[in-house]
Image (tube, grey):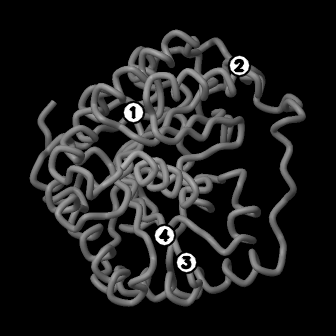
Amino acid sequence: MESGALHVTRSRAKPGGMRVTEGRPFRERKPPWLKVPAPGGPTYRRLKSAIEADNLHTVCQEANCPNVGECWERGTATFMILGDVCTRRCGFCNVQTGKPTWNDPLEPMRVANQVRKMGLRHAVVTSVDRDDLPDYGAGAFVGVIRSIRMLAPDCKVEVLTPDFRGQEMPLAKVVHERPDVFNHNVETVPRLYPKARRGSDFLRSARVLRLAKEMAGDEVVTKSGLMVGLGETFEEMVEAFRILRAHRVQILTIGQYLRPTEQHLPVVRYWHPEEFDALRDTAYELGFESVASGPLVRSSYHADESAREVAEGRAAAA
């Protein structure tokens, strides 16, 4: 497939029209360790109103993150730039797909202004895939990083980027701005990519992370994340960890996949909290500098703490 082509599948629950039969019923009762209070505290309501008033998008809302109440009550949020329409159609993702029309040159300043007003110490900026743009959206990340550092210079900046179709120039533009953390999620094990991430490639994503580290060295911390629950095995997860470590990834997040709607891929299995502990311990043994592993962990969950753990570990080793 040519690098500029858009990838479309007919159904998220049946990627490419294939029949996906294994999985748990959508409306079954979930395990008790997946129960979280519904959001609705005063800080949550205030931030929700402020973000909507600025016509901004957050992955917290778009992806139905289970931690939105906790994170927003703590006064943190993950901003999603470049609109809320994605050019890809991953089987697990709740962000809408289609032909994007979003083009707002003032978005970087509006995001930075919201970061300043919220008093954030660690801001996470992500985006939908924009395979329709010549630079795949890299310029927007550059604009947001620069704007945050102008309006909120004490705030750490973490970017969670697409794979830029594996192209080095868009990646180099973002890394040149030296975000404090460069994150790109591989999401699942290589075997499940045809089912869960059609149009993407595990090793291409791993290469993006390695290149980011090679371009920036110790000035940028690299990070990635995976889900469980799509049919992977413990051994496949560990092998994915090994590949990420070989590509110089420093921070790892591991969480449970939760099916957003009946139109998405089914959950094959709910992993027990003790299994997440075993994954965490194995990841540390493989050399990751910070690991967040738990049923409700998401890529940006307590992102400031992960970055601080890496910084403290390096300072102690110096």
Q: Amino acid at mark 2?
A: Arg
Name the residue rendered at 25%, 43% in the picture: 6
Q: Amino acid at mark 4?
A: Ala
Q: State which tag comes first along the sequence, 2 or 3.
A: 3
- Residue 142 at x, y = what percent? 24, 70
Q: State which tag comes first along the sequence, 4 or 1.
A: 1
Marks 2, 1: nearer the viewer: 2
Name the residue rendered at 45%, 21% in the picture: 189
- Residue 173 at x, y = what percent? 15, 62
Give the labeled residue for mark 4: 123
| Secondary structure at numbered mark 3 | loop
Give the labeled residue for mark 3: 120
Marks 4 and 2, how far apart in space?
Answer: 32 Å
- Near mark 3 (Cα within 10 A), the count class, few <14, some 14-19 or many ≥20, is some
Horizontal relation, residue 304 to residue 186: left or right: right
| Secondary structure at numbered mark 4 | strand
Q: Are marks 1 and 3 in contact (CB under 8 Å)?
A: no
| Secondary structure at numbered mark 2 | loop
Marks 4 and 1, how far apart in space?
Answer: 33 Å
| Secondary structure at numbered mark 1 | loop
- Near mark 1 (Cα within 10 A), the count class, few <14, some 14-19 or many ≥20, is some
Name the residue rendered at 42%, 40% in the picture: 224
Give the labeled residue for mark 2: 269
Marks 2 and 3, how far apart in space?
Answer: 36 Å
- How many numbered discs? 4
Q: State which tag comes first along the sequence, 2 or 1.
A: 1
Give the labeled residue for mark 1: 9
| Residue 158 vertical position relative to residue 289 in the rendered view, above or below | below
